[in-house]
Image (tube, helix red, strand yellow):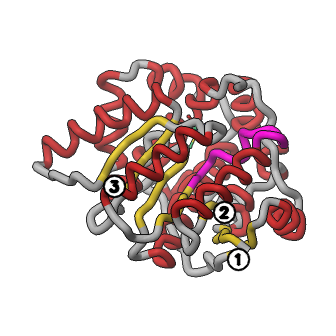
Amino acid sequence: MDDHNKTSITALGCINVLARSTDVPNSLEIFNELMEFYPTIKQYIAYSQRGFPRVCPRRNYSFTYGRYLSLNDALENVKNHSILEIGAGFSPRGLNFSENRVYLETDLPEIIEEKRKIIELIRERKGIHNVNHMFNELNILDFDKLRLCGKIIKDKSENPISLVSEGVLMYLEDYEQEKARDDITKFLAEFSQNGYWITPDFSYRNTLSNSNMCLDLREVRTDRKFNDFSTNEAISDFLRQGGLKVEFLSNEKISFSFKDNEMFSLIGPICEPSYYQCAKISLI
Ligand SMILES: C[S@@+](CC[C@H](N)C(=O)[O-])C[C@H]1O[C@@H](n2cnc3c(N)ncnc32)[C@H](O)[C@@H]1O
């Protein structure tokens, strides 16, 4: 299996945006814990701030925040479902959406172990006890591990399971995207025929990064080219070939603003909502 660990640094970029520029609950808490015992984040922040044009963080930040909110909104479609999050990184979503459901956060082993420690510290400090919020390692290209995650969730609840992912698919090569798709189809068939895979990742377009130095540099660091889908038809075809169908959810109602509004009001329109529209995917 190819090395995916190099992509994990991008998870630091996402929590950096949410914690420092937005009011997303628990994002600052996670970020502060990372600063304490995960020194790589300091390196990352120094790197991402080195002399980039202001337009770059601006588009990039609105994309990251918009996509976070878009997927949260989409969870309204699966209110009684248990959630398996793929490539959860340091996102606060698990902490913010696990109160009334089983929520299993997964990522590559090193990252998910850091995440578990951080969330336990925050919970301890806030006196929150939640046995339904869990963590497990998962490389999405390893079906045995995916199946294990399904069993962990089913041991806790008989509710349908939906998978969610944010900022993962575009780091996979064509053959890896196909394997992920096929394994998710197998997962839904085995564990939850009325479950979904919900993700804004299919809507990402490389045109977003073409003029964006931050993202281009990130490709260099991860050794991976962003791998996008150029049209909704291409997405539907890709999914149909794997036995899946797709509905694109409207995210027109999402509105957001940043703490540092001055920075974001300087130049042109922010990144279009179509770049982080969620796909709600199910078995055919
Ligand atoms: C851009 S970050 C997004 C993190 C988080 N979803 C967020 O939005 O804050 C990409 C994440 O995908 C994870 N990842 C990369 N390849 C993966 C794979 N093959 N299986 C599972 N996770 C993977 C990385 O470790 C990283 O945490």
Query: Neighbour class for label 1 at 10 Å: few (<14), some, many (≥20)?
Result: few
Foreground pick, 213 / 93: 93
Mark 2 and ligand 1: say if the CB distance to the nearest ligand atom is below 8 Å.
Answer: no
Give the residue displayed 71% in from the left and 66% down from the top. Answer: 272
Foreground pick, 255 / 176: 176
Looking at the rendered structure, which numbered label has been put on residue 276?
2
Establish if 213 lies above or below 18: above
* Residue occupied by mark 1: 247
Going by the image, does 39 lie left or right of 221? Answer: left
Q: Amino acid at mark 2?
A: Tyr
Image depth: mark 1 or mark 2 in front: 1
Q: Mark 2 or 3 closer to N-term?
A: 3
Establish if 156 lies above or below 86: below
Distance from the alpha carbon under mark 2 to that under mark 3: 33 Å
Foreground pick, 134 / 28: 134
Q: Is residue 137 visible?
A: yes
Q: Mark 1 or 2 closer to N-term?
A: 1
Going by the image, does 2 lie left or right of 238? Answer: left
Residue 202, x across and y down, in percent: 73, 59
Under circle 2, the secondary element is helix
Residue 259, x across and y down, in percent: 43, 55
Distance from the alpha carbon under mark 1 to that under mark 2: 14 Å
Occupied quadrant, residue 236: bottom right
Q: Which residues are magenta?
A: 165-176
